[in-house]
C-alpha cells in the first residue's frame, strides 16, 4: 500500500475541485494511478495499491496564468506529510530547468536572459522556503513566489523555443505544409462563419460523424449541410478532414449506443453506418478521422479489448470502401488524467500503440483532442513547457500528429455549453478576483512575434487587471506549429452556438461576434503556413 500526505495551506478557501482533480502518477512512466483521496485536519491524503515512488500533479494558482497543473518531484511513500506548496515549487523548478538544459545542450537553443533572471529569483525564494520548513514554519509566501517566478521563467523559455525552432524550420524559404484550420459548424449560418475563417485556413474539418444519421436510418440524409460544406471546401481548394466518424464523447455519441446495448450489436451498427458515410463522401475527403473518445468514454464503458475491437473495426470499415485515403484516430484526454478515477481505465498510449501495431500501413497519424482548461471533461490547464512535453511524448509512436484544440477565450457565462461551470480558471482560491474579463488571447504572445517591436509603455493601460488565463492563443498555436511532429492543427469549436460542448471556446461568440483569435490565426497562417 502506498501513502502520500500533504499539508494544505488554507484549504477551506480553495474551490474543492482543486483537491478533487489532484492525482498521483508513476515517477518513471508518468501514468496516473487510481487512488483514494481524502482531506482530514488540513492534510491531503492519497492511498494507492502499489508502494512505488510517485509524483503529485494538480492545478495550482500562479500569478501569470492562474491555475495550471504543477507536478512534484518523485516522492517516497510516507506517513509523514510533505508540504504541498514546497513540493510543487521544487517539482516546477526541476521540470523547467531540466527542459532548459536539454534544449540548450541537445538542441542548441539560445536561452534568453529573461529566463535566467526569473529562474534565479525562483531559486532564491525556494531556498528561503526550505529554510522556513526546517525552522518548522509552514512554507507560505516564499514557496508561492518561487512557483510564480518559475512559471515566469517557463514562459520566456517557451517563447524562445517556439521562435527559434520556427525560424529554423523556415530557413529554406518555404512555408510549413501543416494543415491549419477549423472544425466547421453545422448551424444554418455556417456559410458566413466559414467565409470569415477562410484567411486563417488551408484545411477544414467537416463533421461526418454517424451521430448525424437520423434514428431509423443508416446513412446521412441527402440534404445534410455537410454535403454543401464538402462542395464549398472543394471550390476553395481547402483540404478536408472528414470526421470523427464515430465519437463516444458526451453530446456526440450516436443515440443507439446505450449502456445496456450489447457490444456486438453496437459494433454491427457502427461499422455499417461508417461504410455508408464513407461511400457517400468517397473522393471528397483528404483525410479520414476514424474515431474519437473511445479510450475515455464515460457513458459507454469499454474494456481494453472492446475499445480495441471497436476502433480497429472502424478503420477496417473505412478501408473496405476507401483503400487509399489516409486515416487517423483521435485520443481524448491525451494527458490521461481520467485514469486516476477508475481502476479499469484504458491507458491511451498503449491503446494507440496496439492499434498502430495492427494497422500500421493504414494509420497515417494520431489525433490528440486537447480541450484545455476544462475539467473533468477536458485536459487540465498546462503551461507551454508542459504542453510541449505532452506533444513530445506522443511523437514516440512515430506517427504524424493532428491536434484538435479548444480553450476558453473568455470567462463570461455560457449557459448553452454542454460542459457548463467546467473552466478551471474560474475556480476560487485565496487572492482570486473572479471576473468575466479575461486576458485577451492576442496578449499572451511575444510582442515581436510578427516582426513588430513595441516600445515600452506603449501598451494600453488597463484599469482593472483581467483574470489570468493559461496559454490559449498565439503562444499556444505558435508552439504547436514549431513541432515537426504536428502535421495538423484544427481549432475544434468555431462558434458558441446552441450545440457546443466547451464554454467560451468558439472563435465566434453565441451572438456571432468574431473573437480576436481569428485575426491571430490569419496572421499566423500568412507568416508560417502555406
Image: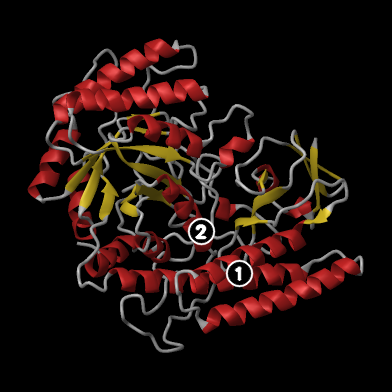
Q: CA distance from mark 2 to mark 1?
A: 34 Å
Where is residue 163? Give x, y as percent: 38, 73
Q: First in sequence, mark 2 or 1: give its number.
A: 1
Work out whether 352 lies above or below 405: above
In the rendered image, the vertical position of residue 302 relative to residue 291, given as above or below = above
**Picture disc at residue 138:** none
Residue at 67 percent of width and 49 percent of height: 27
* Mark 1, other Cα within 10 Å: few <14 / some 14–19 / many ≥20: some
Q: Please tell me which residue is depicted at 67% across the width and 35% down the height of the picture.
A: 34
Task: Quadrant for the C terminus, please.
Answer: bottom left
Residue 318 drawn above or below residue 42:
above
Residue 128: in sight, yes or no? yes
Q: Horizontally, is 185 left or right of 372 in the view?
A: left
Q: Secondary structure at mark 1?
A: helix
Nearer to us of marks 2 and 1 is: 1
Q: Is residue 158 left or right of residue 236?
A: right
Secondary-structure class at tag 2: loop
Q: Is residue 260 left or right of residue 516?
A: right
Residue 465 figure quarter: bottom right
Q: Quadrant of residue 137?
A: bottom right
Is residue 210 at least partly visible in the picture?
no
- Residue assigned mark 2: 436
Looking at the image, is 312 positioned above or below residue 41? above
Count of labels shown? 2
Q: Which residue is mark 1?
A: 97
Q: Position of residue 335 (x, y in %)?
A: 53, 46
Quadrant location of the N terminus? top right
Question: How far across and down, in percent of the image, does residue 76 sit?
Answer: 79, 49
Amino acid at each position: 500500500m502506498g501513502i502520500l500526505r500533504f499539508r494544505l495551506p488554507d484549504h477551506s478557501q480553495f474551490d474543492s475541485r482543486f483537491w478533487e482533480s489532484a492525482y498521483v502518477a508513476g515517477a518513471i512512466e508518468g501514468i496516473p494511478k487510481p487512488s483514494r483521496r481524502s482531506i482530514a485536519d488540513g492534510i491531503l491524503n492519497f492511498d494507492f495499491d502499489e508502494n512505488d515512488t510517485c509524483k503529485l500533479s494538480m492545478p495550482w494558482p500562479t500569478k501569470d496564468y492562474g491555475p495550471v497543473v504543477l507536478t512534484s518531484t518523485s516522492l517516497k511513500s510516507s506517513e509523514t506529510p510533505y508540504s504541498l506548496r514546497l513540493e510543487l515549487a521544487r517539482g516546477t523548478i526541476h521540470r523547467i530547468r531540466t527542459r532548459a538544459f536539454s534544449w540548450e545542450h541537445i538542441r542548441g537553443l539560445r536561452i534568453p536572459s529573461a529566463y535566467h533572471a526569473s529562474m534565479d529569483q525562483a531559486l532564491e525564494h525556494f531556498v528561503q522556503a526550505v529554510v522556513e520548513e526546517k525552522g518548522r514554519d509552514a512554507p507560505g509566501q516564499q514557496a508561492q513566489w518561487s512557483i510564480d517566478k518559475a512559471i515566469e521563467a517557463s514562459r520566456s523559455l517557451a517563447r524562445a523555443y517556439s521562435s527559434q525552432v520556427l525560424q529554423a524550420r523556415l530557413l529554406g524559404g518555404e512555408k510549413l505544409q501543416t494543415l491549419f484550420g477549423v472544425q466547421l459548424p453545422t448551424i444554418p449560418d455556417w456559410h458566413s462563419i466559414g467565409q470569415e475563417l477562410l484567411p486563417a485556413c488551408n484545411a477544414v474539418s467537416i463533421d461526418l460523424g454517424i451521430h448525424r444519421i437520423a434514428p431509423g436510418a443508416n446513412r446521412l440524409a441527402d440534404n445534410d449541410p455537410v454535403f454543401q460544406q464538402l462542395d464549398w471546401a472543394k471550390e476553395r481548394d481547402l483540404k478536408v478532414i472528414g470526421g470523427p466518424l464515430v465519437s463516444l464523447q458526451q453530446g456526440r455519441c450516436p443515440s443507439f449506443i446505450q449502456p445496456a446495448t450489447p457490444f456486438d450489436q453496437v459494433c454491427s451498427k457502427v461499422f455499417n453506418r461508417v461504410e455508408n458515410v464513407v461511400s457517400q463522401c468517397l473522393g471528397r475527403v483528404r483525410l479520414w478521422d476514424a474515431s474519437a473518445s473511445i479510450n475515455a468514454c464515460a457513458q459507454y464503458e469499454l474494456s481494453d479489448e472492446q475499445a480495441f475491437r471497436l476502433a480497429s473495426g472502424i478503420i477496417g470499415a473505412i478501408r473496405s470502401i476507401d483503400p487509399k485515403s489516409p486515416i487517423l484516430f483521435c485520443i481524448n484526454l491525451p494527458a490521461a488524467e481520467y485514469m486516476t478515477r477508475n481502476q479499469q481505465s484504458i491507458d491511451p498510449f498503449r491503446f494507440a500503440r496496439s492499434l498502430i501495431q495492427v494497422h500500421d500501413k493504414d494509420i497515417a497519424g494520431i489525433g490528440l483532442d486537447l480541450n484545455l482548461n476544462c475539467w473533468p471533461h477536458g485536459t487540465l490547464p498546462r503551461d507551454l513547457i508542459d504542453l510541449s512535453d505532452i506533444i513530445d511524448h506522443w511523437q514516440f509512436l512515430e506517427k504524424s500528429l493532428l491536434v484538435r484544440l479548444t480553450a476558453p477565450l473568455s470567462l463570461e457565462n455560457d449557459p448553452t455549453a454542454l460542459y457548463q461551470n467546467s473552466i478551471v480558471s474560474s475556480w476560487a482560491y485565496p487572492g482570486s478576483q473572479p471576473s468575466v474579463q479575461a486576458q485577451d488571447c492576442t496578449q499572451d504572445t511575444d510582442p515581436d512575434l510578427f516582426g513588430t517591436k513595441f516600445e515600452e509603455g506603449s501598451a494600453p493601460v488597463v484599469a482593472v487587471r483581467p483574470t489570468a488565463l493559461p496559454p490559449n492563443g498565439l503562444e499556444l498555436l505558435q508552439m504547436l506549429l514549431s513541432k515537426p511532429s504536428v502535421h495538423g492543427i484544427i481549432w475544434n469549436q468555431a462558434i458558441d452556438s446552441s450545440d457546443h460542448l466547451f464554454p467560451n471556446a468558439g472563435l465566434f461568440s453565441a451572438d456571432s461576434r468574431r473573437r480576436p483569435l481569428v485575426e491571430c490565426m490569419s496572421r499566423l497562417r500568412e507568416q508560417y503556413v502555406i
